[in-house]
Amino acid sequence: MRSCIEIALSPQLMDAEAQGLIKKARDYFDIGIEAGRCIHLVTMEADLSPDDLALVKDEIFTNPVIQVSSLSPLDVDFDWCIWVGFRPGVRDNAGSTAMEAISDLLKREFLPDEGIYTSKRYCLTGKNLSKNDVEKIADELLANAIIQQWKVFSRSEWDASKGVGAIIPKVLLNHEPKCDVMDIDSNEALQAISDARNLALNSRDIPVIRDYFLDPDVVASRKKAGLSQPTDVELEYISQARSDHCNHNTFQGLFRYTDGATNETVEEVNLFKTYIKEPTLALKDEKNWVVSVLWDNAGVGKFDDTNNYVITGETHNSPSNMEAYGGAITGIVGVYRDPMGTGLGSRLIMGSYGFCVGDMNYDGPLKAPLHPRRLLDGVIEGVKDGGNKSGVPTTFGQTLFNQGYMGKSLVFVTALGIMPSMVDGKPSHEKTTVPGELIVMSGGRVGKDGIHGVTASSEVLSENTPAGHVQIGDPYTQKKMHDFLLAARDEGLYGFITDNGGGGLSSSVGESAMLSNGCEVWLDKVPLKYDGLDMWEIWISESQERMTIAVKPENIDRFMALSKEHEVESTVIGEYTDSGKLHIKYNDHTCAYVDMDLLDKGFPQWEFDALWMPPALRGLTEPVLSPPKDVNALILSMMARPNICSKEWIARQYDHEVQGGSVIKPLVGMKHNIPSDASVIRPVLTSMKGLAFSQALLPWYSKIDAYHMMTATIDEAVRRLIAVGGTLSHMGGVDNFCWPDIQFHPVKNPDGKFKAAQLVRACRALKDACMAYGIPLLSGKDSMYVDGYLTGEFGEAIKVSALETVQFSATGVVDDVTKCMTLAPKVSGDLVYVLGTTANEMGASEYYELLDQTGLNVPQVNFDQFKVVYRALEKAITNGLTASAHAVARGGLATHGALVALGGGMGFELDLTRVPVDEKNGMPGMDALLFSESAGRFIVTVAPENQSTFEKMFKGMACAMVGRVTDEHSCFVIKGTDGKVLSDLSLDALEAAWAAPFGDMI
């Protein structure tokens, strides 16, 4: 029996969703909609009586105070009606939640062939609306063809008795599951299989794979298991395991690095080992607070005597470029599972985001899969739903714009958790699998969604990228699983846990079985969303909200009972063995039988040629510019730049107060609208200890040299953390690389050698900075191939590559959160100090970008000099000598002085003649003093009574009193090097310019 409930806001109430659509249609396409209403549809395929339907409608789906509902189409006037619903097989989170609510209310279970499906219809009126207009709205604003379907009805076509009809997006595969044998008689045959199945096998891996399956001993062993040639399950497993996404082949590759200035060539044999692993292990030995690094889903640090914190970072670029909302929500809930699967499992305590997209107002000829404006809307919404609906605070985030991200936008997500340092008398960060333990899958079910996610992430985005790797995350299911697993952990019911992320079961079971040295998996036991999946699809699907757990047989009954109590589905799908084999069965027939050490069978290193050409040899020079004459107008223009201006409209959408531990908020200052340097939370509410967190993104400097991009990025993250009360003595890092294709090809990638050299230099810089500042890398991620092919004006495909980008996260323990600091001045009369020197370092700066210049003098980091200042500032903050502190970043002293002034809401005076300078590139001119992005600098305010003590603390360092905070006026005043007023801007004018670009989006 099919039925449908329609729910809408009462007619007298404003429909915010419809109003948002009206605004977007006008702003994006200049389409005028006079009025609109959004109606929610709940379509049910279930044997429910009329009384049941009425009860469900009134008790679950309708708020009688603000909503109206009906079991027949609501009578809402329109000229055009657009219906939007999910495609078959796409996760319908609201529909799944509705099924649970109805089950609870009616005390009945749904049958396997029953379901609930949600959709919407938009009733639009407008005398000038055409069918083309409405279809454009449906296709480009309301639906994404990858996951959604839509229909348009005119008033004349509408049948008020039928409405849109009972549309049931049920998957009907009509397919008998099978396991195919693959013919690999030649390298060419295996390459053809790889191409046809989108395995993305490296050509140098193909002979190794063939040699393994043709080895006489392997052939004999497999014959006993009933196999001969490799099966599709086995090749898919190898493809996942050997993908760059899972195996990090690029970072473990061989680089022949040639310096174009000297013609000297050196071999870098393993970037990961040399520049990440070795320095991190060396620092781990020095830092007693480092608990676990490099092997688990996330890194672990000591929070206090009884708790450890967990941190990791991730990207979800390729899926988000195909379906922005689904890719982003999957990214955030996916990275949340990493702390859940670290050690014996942690409780989630915060998340963060970073978005790198093209120009929101782009109106040129290139056509991306999603316009940057729509893509940003989607990823913001996805991270919001994934975070807010998981009950996890989102306390920090960054958004930046560059045309290079038109090819592939970047979506960074970070997650932190906390867990007791001991569980059941054992260290919580230790775990292993043991022969005889049962393999349990908990959480969601398996479908076709998410198939080939990691292989798609290991390729350049093109028109051939399969949409099947896009998933829709379900925060509700994951939240229930999160709470259940913490309860099971505390009862000591399991000894190993990991998440089902990239590669699905093939990764989680395949990797965990290496610890026991074998496993037997029963794929027919794996719960499916619908029948008809082939064995290989079950094995590699990346369907979300799933964890793999090792449970001893004696604990399985209690584990399952607890799972049922929390309404989480858990299923035994196999057992760990010590057979040395990965043995996969379906209905007791073997469909995979390979050695556990297969991936150690001599697979070759990937190899890259890297050619570094120094900036000067590439023709980069400093531009010839005279000093600006209208500094007031220039500062206002800088404040309105997309990469400087207010992003309050984004931050306001995220809940940072949930869990009650927020100390330093994402937005601070008198009006709570200035982005904070970093966030601070109290993960243990009975303690005054805090966890500080910051991030930095400075990809523009890669235009000149990725080495200095990396050092400046890390330095900014460090300064941001110190500005709120963090310390170098306890600071861990997370490096998240996003890099364009580095494999040279004379036609497809002619600059590959240079981009490879940039990667080498960035890795060298990573080690230099981390060793200098004493920052162990607790976790990290590399996401290669941030390139895309866009359709040009005449139908041509144009390759667009993103800037070489690294997001660096820093975190550390704050012993006393009452001493934490914000950037906002507090009291009139306080003195303004600048710490650190300003040099003529405007290469790739925001100022040069404004003038359409690149320059040569990129900011450089002097670790030894800077550390002295940083430690002194740490001491000053701890001793209560500072009233505010702020790290100077993108845009220089002028823009960040303005932000500090806006934060305090008082007059702010700055004298350029007093600013400490460095003459390494010549004496900085007025424009450099204002807009240089030299690293290592802070703006600090100090009460007059603390002046003497503060200055003694910084004696001999780059520290100068450059101005004051005042209530005598409400302006930002800058005196030039000639002692005359160079700029005098009211705070109202500054705020108006800063808020204008996106102000109407709040």
Image (spheres, rainbow, N blue to C red):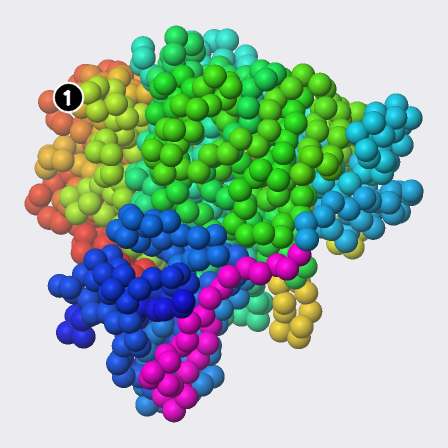
Give the residue displayed 9% in from the left and 43% down from the top. 967
Residue placed under numbered mark 1 in the picture: 946
The mark total stands at: 1
The answer to whether any part of residue 811 appears in the image is no
**473 falls in the magenta region:** no
State yes or no: residue 172 in magenta: yes
List x then y, in percent, for residue 894. 31, 45
Coordinates of residue 986 in the picture (x, y in percent): 18, 54
> Where does the magenta region start and end?
150-175
- 616 lies left or right of 727: right
Q: Is residue 875 above or below residue 254?
A: above
Return the residue nearer the eye: 161 or 208: 161
In the image, 554 versus 859, the foreground residue is: 554
Q: Quadrant of the N terminus?
A: bottom left
Check the image and name the residue furthest to the left: 968
Along the line of sight, which residue is nearer the eye, 796 or 574? 574
Dividing the picture into quadrants, the one containing residue 575 is top right
Looking at the rendered structure, the kind of residue marked 1 is Asn
Task: Assign the C terminus to one quadrant of the image.
Answer: bottom left
Main SS type for the magenta part? Answer: loop
